């Protein structure tokens, strides 16, 4: 699908991730919706779970065990965050529709085994903007597991033949040991850079920055799709990314 952009907005941008209970950041959600509304083009949006998902996933030990109540409560919570994002986009004039991974994906040992792509394809072709999110999802081996938006983005991008991928985090891309942005990462440099790349400082059951980089390096390596990690908490940066401007860290295949 030519020109399609897949963008993930991290849970740290739209929620207070330091909170152990769900706490949304309404101003940030509204700003993001307005920036997205300002740039036309095909888009699939994925957002993180932040304080609506990670504390509950940890409380119910969803990465270790099957727990019916944990599935219900965690999904209900991330769905409520998704409703806030979709509502803000709708109010800004974006034709956004919710897509919940629990209802359309199946995992095996935590990796996506199967996902309904036909509805997404039809939505995008008809000008709708699907809005997915990190979720608890059924798993053929474990019963259920956590599916991070970081895994959804490369999967969807590859299946849909996306043109550009963005991961909007709350820092200026991937930083080195001097806190300077690493402009480029490739499969051959990632091992050397790994020591600089930390996990998340908050409750994060899906791996923080290192998890994101690993997913995107794999995408570049296997499918030649490049992506960009940038600071989406800086006003205007989502607009810049959508317009194709250079910023943050680019992850691409070795030349
Ligand atoms: O915030 C995690 O998704 P992420 C989903 O995109 C849950 O890593 C339920 C913790």
Image (cartoon, rainbow, N blue to C red):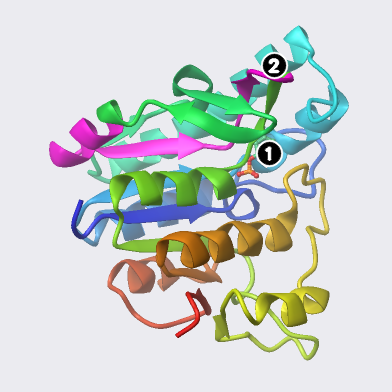
- Mark 2 or mark 1, earlier in chain: 1
Residue 68 horizontal/vertical position (percent):
74, 8
Q: Secondary structure at mark 1?
A: loop
Please state which of residues 107 and 17 is positioned toward the viewer in this rendering.
107
Q: Secondary structure at mark 2?
A: helix
Residue 55 seen in the current view: yes
Q: Quadrant of ligand 1?
A: top right
Between tags 2 and 1, which lies in front? 2
Q: Residue at x 59, y 56 (%)?
A: 215
Q: Residue at x 21, y 60 (%)?
A: 3
Task: Place residue 117 in its image quadrant.
Answer: top left
- The residue furthest top is 68
Task: Place residue 255 in its image quadrant.
Answer: bottom left
The residue that disc 1 covers is 23
Q: Is 29 drawn above or below residue 186 in the view shown?
A: above
Q: Residue at x 47, y 51 (%)?
A: 154
- The residue furthest left is 126
Residue 254 horizontal/vertical position (percent):
50, 81
Specify whether 19 is left or right of 137: right
The residue that disc 2 covers is 71
Residue 127 seen in the current view: no
Residue 57 horizontal/vertical position (percent):
77, 29
Magenta range is: 120-142
Question: Is 195 one of the magenta-colored residues?
Answer: no
Badge 1 local density, few (<14 within 10 Å), some, or many (20+)?
A: some
């Amino acid at each position: 699908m030519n020109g399609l952009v897949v963008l993930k907005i991290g849970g740290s941008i739209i929620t207070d991730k330091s909170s152990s209970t769900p706490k949304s950041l309404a101003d940030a959600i509204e700003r993001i919706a307005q920036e997205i509304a300002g740039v036309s083009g095909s888009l699939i949006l994925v957002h993180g779970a932040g304080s609506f998902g990670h504390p509950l996933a940890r409380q119910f030990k969803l990465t270790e065990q099957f727990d019916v109540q944990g599935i219900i409560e965690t999904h209900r919570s991330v769905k409520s965050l998704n409703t806030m994002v979709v509502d803000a986009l709708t109010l800004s004039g974006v034709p956004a529709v919710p897509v919940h991974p629990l209802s359309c994906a199946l995992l095996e040992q935590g990796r996506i085994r199967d996902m309904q792509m036909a509805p997404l394809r039809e939505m995008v072709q008809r000008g709708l903007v699907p809005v997915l999110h990190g979720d608890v999802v059924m798993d053929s081996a474990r019963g259920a597991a956590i599916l991070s938006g970081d895994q959804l983005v490369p999967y969807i991008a590859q299946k849909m033949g996306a043109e550009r991928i963005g991961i909007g985090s709350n820092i200026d891309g991937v930083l080195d040991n001097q806190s300077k942005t690493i402009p480029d990462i490739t499969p051959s440099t990632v091992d050397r850079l790994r020591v600089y790349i930390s996990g998340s400082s908050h409750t994060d059951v899906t791996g923080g920055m290192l998890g994101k980089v690993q997913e995107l390096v794999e995408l570049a390596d296997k499918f030649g799709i490049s992506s960009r990690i940038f600071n989406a908490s800086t006003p205007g940066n989502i607009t810049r990314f959508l317009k194709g401007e250079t910023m943050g860290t680019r992850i691409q295949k070795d030349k």
